[in-house]
Image (tube, rainbow, N blue to C red):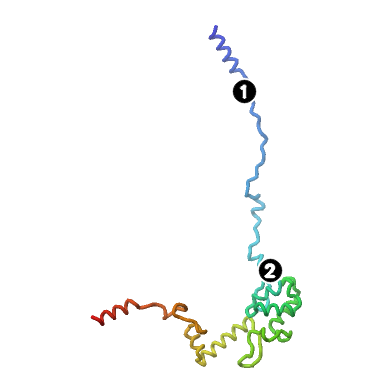
Amino acid sequence: MVEKKDVQKTKKESKKPEPKVEEKPTVETKAVGRKPLEKQDEKKPKKDELRAENIIRLAETNLDATKPVRRAIRRISGVGFMFSDAVANVCGFGDKKLGDLTEEERQKLENILMHPEKYDIPSWLYNRRRDPVTGEDKHLTVSQLELTKKMDIGQMKKLKTYRGVRHSLGLPVRGQRTRSSFRHGRSVGVIKKKAQQSSGKKQA
């Protein structure tokens, strides 16, 4: 009897319906850090392209259009802090951004940089006073500055002045020491071993 009851129980247990597994609604998961294909195809503009929009050509130099005038013109060779402040005060739009200037204002700014004597900028701000040829006070920028510098060095070499000789030898001009610095060319190298050997042979 016991065996029959056990068999019946096992049959009843086997007939029990299997529990239904509830299917969870599928949630669309977005991949972190990935963009849709349409956005991935869109190319970002390069840094060079962005910068090209913010560059203005003035006095043979590329200047940053996002900076104010008094800061932007300091990038021009021959224009320092004092001279740029003087130009900004004379032109009347020194604190205005370079990119916001009109065509007339840009031409006026370039004219001030090339001919500061016409706008009553004091001569002690110029970078070439009492020119040796003309005796005039001038302010040189960009190509004029480079050309006059080369001509001055060439004149000193031609006259064989002390500075000209130092320039031609490629050595410092203003009295610097050359024992440990400016060591290049033939001056480099110490012949200690050969000197020791020659002194040893003489003693023998």
* Residue nearest the viewer, comparing 153 with 137: 137
* Residue nearest the viewer, comparing 95 with 26: 95
Quarter residue 23 falls in? top right
Q: Residues within 10 Å of mark 1 (few under 14, many from 20)?
A: few
Quarter residue 17 falls in? top right
Marks 2 and 1 sit apart, C-alpha to C-alpha, by 73 Å
Which of discs 2 and 1 lies nearer the camera? The answer is: 2
The N terminus lies in which quarter of the figure? Answer: top right
Which residue corresponds to the image point at 55% horizontal and 12% vertical from the top-left?
7
Q: Which residue is mark 2?
A: 54
Q: Which residue is mark 1?
A: 18
The C terminus lies in which quarter of the figure? Answer: bottom left
Which residue corresponds to the image point at 57% horizontal and 88% vertical from the top-left?
152
Q: In the displayed structure, would residue 18 be above or below residue 88?
A: above
| Mark drawn on residue 51 | none
* Residue nearest the viewer, comparing 142 with 18: 142
Going by the picture, which residue comes out furthest to the top?
1
* Residue nearest the viewer, comparing 161 with 148: 161
Q: Position of residue 122 (x, y in %)?
A: 70, 85
Q: Position of residue 106 (x, y in %)?
A: 73, 77
